[in-house]
Image: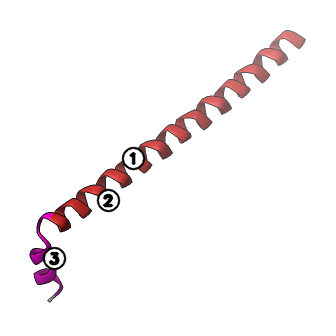
Amino acid sequence: MAALSSAITVANALYGALGTTGQSAIEVAQGKVDVIADAASKSARHVNPQREQTARE
């Protein structure tokens, strides 16, 4: 019975660790998407600042 209890404890710990790792991977990926989108936006404004000015008016 102790072996079963230990196995369940280990399985729960592994499940928790995998969930945390997956969440961290999602946060890193989202951060990279945000950085890329910001860089693309700045690049577009730099290439064509007149279009941005026209859009504001």
x 24%, y 56%: residue:
40
Pointer 2: what residue?
38
Q: Secondary structure at mark 2?
A: helix
Return the disc, 3 or 1, that comes first in the chain's sequence.
1
Extreme residue toward the bottom, this view: 57
x 10%, y 75%: residue:
51
**Residue 40 shown left or right of residue 52 in the figure:** right
In this rendering, the answer to whether 5 lies above or below 29 is above
Q: Position of residue 7 (x, y in %)?
A: 77, 15
**Quarter containing the C terminus:** bottom left
The three-letter code of the residue at mark 3 reads Glu
Q: How many marks?
A: 3
x 61%, y 37%: residue:
20
Q: Position of residue 33 (x, y in %)?
A: 35, 49
Q: Quadrant of residue 52?
A: bottom left
**Residue 40 shown left or right of residue 50 in the figure:** right
* Distance between the alpha carbons at the discs numbered 3 and 2: 15 Å
Range shown magenta: 47-56
- The numbered dot on residue 52 is 3
In this rendering, the answer to whether 51 lies above or below 30 is below
Q: Main secondary structure of the magenta part?
A: helix
Pointer 1: what residue?
32
The three-letter code of the residue at mark 2 reads Asp
Disc 3 packing (10 Å; few <14; some 14–19; many ≥20) = few
Q: Position of residue 18 (x, y in %)?
A: 60, 29
Name the foreground residue: 21 vs 2.
Answer: 21
